[in-house]
Image (spheres, helix red, strand yellow):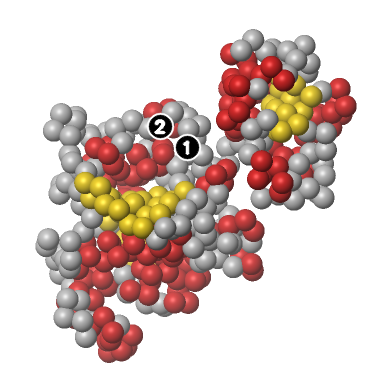
């Protein structure tokens, strides 16, 4: 494949010394390194995947790195988001990432987009870059990035992680299939938990994030065979890589416009959205719950291993997956409060019980983490 960047930039003597181990590789050489310097790469997300990706893009000598993020560094990020440190807790992730990038390579031009990528800004932001690396963990943003890249003719380097498993691919409408050819429709809401709810093996981020940068470098310099029309599936527990082939759907309608992706996927793109605000009347705040806790039945719908981490005294554990077969343990005459980590899964449980005829239901707003912050700081958050 022809290099994505046609004209290499000229290297300074300092850059020749810095990148000497690249330059002595015939497949990279002066021309390849010059193409990396001339390249502009947009990184969507500076979290688990974005952290190693940003650091290796900088180390490799990519001249311009754009960072899209709206979040701040939290202590729970640090086991996998290695671009941030303890000193960065509370700081904007984009600012923290920029500091690390420039420490690795002061010659990189870092452009910050302090925003959530949306349908009304994605085309304008992505248009200024040669390719996009997606480091997010939600379906609305994945479909948004895919569609915007398809409209603009940009390569989309995809990565995904969950617990011990990872996925890696390149989607490029001008050269092969897109994300929609593999996943024409998103999964039903709640079927695939986020990393915040399902967990992720921290070091897996480095494996997949470095793989994304590998694909980006191949595209920029024209070396090797990029993962177009193929997806790599990685199982960290078995150290096993598998490859699946992806074909373009000849009957698929061309992507010509951006849509409302949260509506399309039935879920929010913003990880900080804790509950369904359209059902606000069923929410009970931690403070309100504390006043009536002795008069209600508190059901914790998290998984058993989460219940071991933290629990509210007096709660009863019925995991969400077991709820449909354990409803007979509940009395529909009782006032029931449902609780999980952040309030999302407990809203799903509420809908299940409501569909079975239960009416005296409330959802603990913000889950056990909000209760710990606002009422009982002795309860650990995670």
186 left or right, relative to 152: right
Out of 64 and 139, give the one closest to the viewer: 139
Pinpoint residue 257: horizontal percent, then vertical percent. Answer: 27, 33
Determine the residue positioned at 51% across, 43% down. 194
Determine the residue positioned at 39% across, 28% down. 264
The residue at which mark 2 appears reads as: 187
Pinpoint residue 110: horizontal percent, then vertical percent. Answer: 40, 66
Q: How many marks?
A: 2
Out of 351 and 291, give the one closest to the viewer: 351
Mark 2 neighbour class, 10 Å CA radius: few under 14, some 14 to 19, many 20 or more: few
Determine the residue positioned at 23% across, 35% down. 255
Mark 1 neighbour class, 10 Å CA radius: few under 14, some 14 to 19, many 20 or more: some
Determine the residue positioned at 69% across, 12% down. 359
- Of helix, strand and loop, which one carries label 2? loop
State the mark number for residue 192: 1
287 left or right, relative to 252: right
Q: Earlier in the sequence, mark 2 or mark 1?
A: 2
The residue lying furthest to the front in this view is 238
Pinpoint residue 245: horizontal percent, then vertical percent. Answer: 21, 46
How far separated are the C-alphas under marks 2 and 1? 7 Å
Q: Can you tell which quarter of the image residue 139 is in?
A: top left
């Amino acid at each position: 494949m022809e290099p994505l960047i046609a004209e290499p930039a000229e290297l300074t003597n300092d850059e020749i010394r810095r990148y000497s181990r690249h330059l002595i590789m015939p497949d990279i050489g002066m021309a390849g390194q010059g193409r990396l310097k001339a390249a502009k790469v947009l990184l969507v997300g500076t979290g688990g995947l974005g952290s190693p990706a940003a650091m290796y893009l900088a180390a490799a000598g990519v001249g311009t790195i754009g960072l899209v993020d709206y979040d701040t560094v939290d202590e729970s990020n640090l086991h996998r988001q290695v671009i941030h440190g303890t000193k960065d807790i509370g700081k904007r992730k984009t600012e923290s990432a920029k500091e690390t990038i420039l420490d690795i390579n002061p010659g990189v031009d870092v452009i910050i987009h302090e925003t959530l990528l949306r349908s009304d800004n994605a085309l304008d932001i992505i248009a200024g870059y040669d390719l996009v690396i997606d480091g997010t963990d939600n379906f609305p943003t994945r479909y948004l990035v895919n569609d915007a890249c398809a409209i603009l003719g940009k390569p989309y380097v995809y990565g995904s992680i969950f617990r011990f498993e990872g996925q890696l691919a390149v989607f490029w409408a001008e050269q092969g299939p897109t994300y929609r050819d593999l996943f024409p429709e998103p999964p039903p809401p709640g079927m695939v938990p986020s990393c915040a709810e399902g967990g992720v093996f921290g070091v897996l981020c480095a494996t997949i994030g470095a793989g994304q940068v590998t694909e980006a470098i191949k595209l920029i310099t024209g070396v090797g065979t990029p993962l177009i029309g193929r997806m790599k599936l990685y199982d960290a527990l078995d150290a096993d890589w598998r490859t699946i082939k992806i074909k373009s759907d000849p009957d698929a309608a061309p992507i010509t416009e951006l849509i409302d992706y949260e509506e399309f996927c039935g879920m929010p793109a913003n990880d900080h959205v804790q509950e369904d605000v359209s059902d606000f009347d069923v929410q009970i705040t931690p403070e309100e719950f504390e006043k009536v806790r002795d008069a209600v039945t508190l059901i914790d719908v998290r998984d058993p291993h989460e219940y071991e981490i933290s629990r509210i005294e007096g709660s009863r554990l019925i995991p969400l997956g077991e709820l449909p077969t354990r409803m007979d343990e509940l009395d529909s005459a009782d006032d029931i409060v449902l609780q999980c980590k952040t309030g999302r899964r407990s809203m799903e449980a509420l809908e299940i019980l409501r569909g079975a005829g239960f009416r005296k239901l409330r959802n603990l707003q913000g889950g056990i983490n909000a209760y710990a912050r606002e009422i009982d700081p002795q309860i650990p958050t995670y």
